[in-house]
Image (spheres, rainbow, N blue to C red):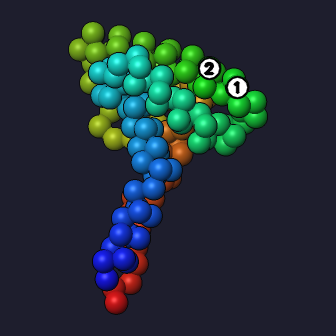
Amino acid sequence: MLDSVISDLKSRFSRDTLNSFRLTVLLPSNIVNCTDDLLQSSVKEISSMYGQLLGLTVPSTRATLILAEVHVWRSRRLRVKREGGIFPSSVEETAKECDIHLYPYVSSLLDIFISLPVSVASAEA
């Protein structure tokens, strides 16, 4: 019994699963309060996990390209905050507001975030 609980916890909280939570840094309410170090480390993990899905085939440039776009995304959100604007309240609303032509990587990452499973369904024994 204890072994199955430990196994379940390991699968639910694997390194990849926990690193997927780094996508939350892209949400407007989070990115405006994020330190530069946290933003950079999050983007580095995100780029290593999802860079190929974004069409970035050269590993050494993935983080740089995504980070550059995320900095522009962050600047826009900081401006909205200064002007007293309201941030979207969900990932879906954020993705709808994200212009795919201005922020192609951020838009794709938000789409990935939306598609991640929320929970694991299993039959009770």
Percent x, y of residue 38: 40, 25
Above or below for 58 versus 73: below
Mark 2, residue position: 64
Is 85 left, or right, of 96 in this rendering? left
Q: Residue furthest front?
A: 3
- As drawn, the residue found furthest toward the left would be 84
Q: Position of residue 9 (x, y in %)?
A: 36, 65
Query: In front here: 121 or 85?
Result: 121
Name the kind of residue labelled 1 in the image: Ser
* Tag 1 secondary structure: helix
Classify the position of the N terminus by image quarter: bottom left
Q: Position of residue 40 (x, y in %)?
A: 48, 22
Q: Quadrant of residue 83?
A: top left
Whether label 2 touches label 1, CB < 8 Å: yes
Q: Is residue 18 above or below residue 96?
A: below
Q: Nearer the viewer, residue 62 or 103?
A: 62
Q: Position of residue 51 (x, y in %)?
A: 65, 36
Q: From this view, report whether residue 42 is shown above or below residue 11.
A: above
Q: Quadrant of residue 50?
A: top right
- In the image, which disc is placed on residue 30? none
Above or below: residue 41 compared with residue 55: above
Q: Nearer the viewer, residue 47 or 115?
A: 47
Label 2: which secondary element = helix
Furthest residue in direction bottom, as rendered: 125
Marker disc for residue 60: 1
Where, by quadrant of the figure, is residue 92 drawn? top left
Q: Residue at x 41, y 43 (%)?
A: 21
Residue 102 seen by the camera: no
Q: Name which residue type carries label 2.
A: Thr
Marks counted in the figure total 2
Image point 70% across, 25% down: which residue? Answer: 60
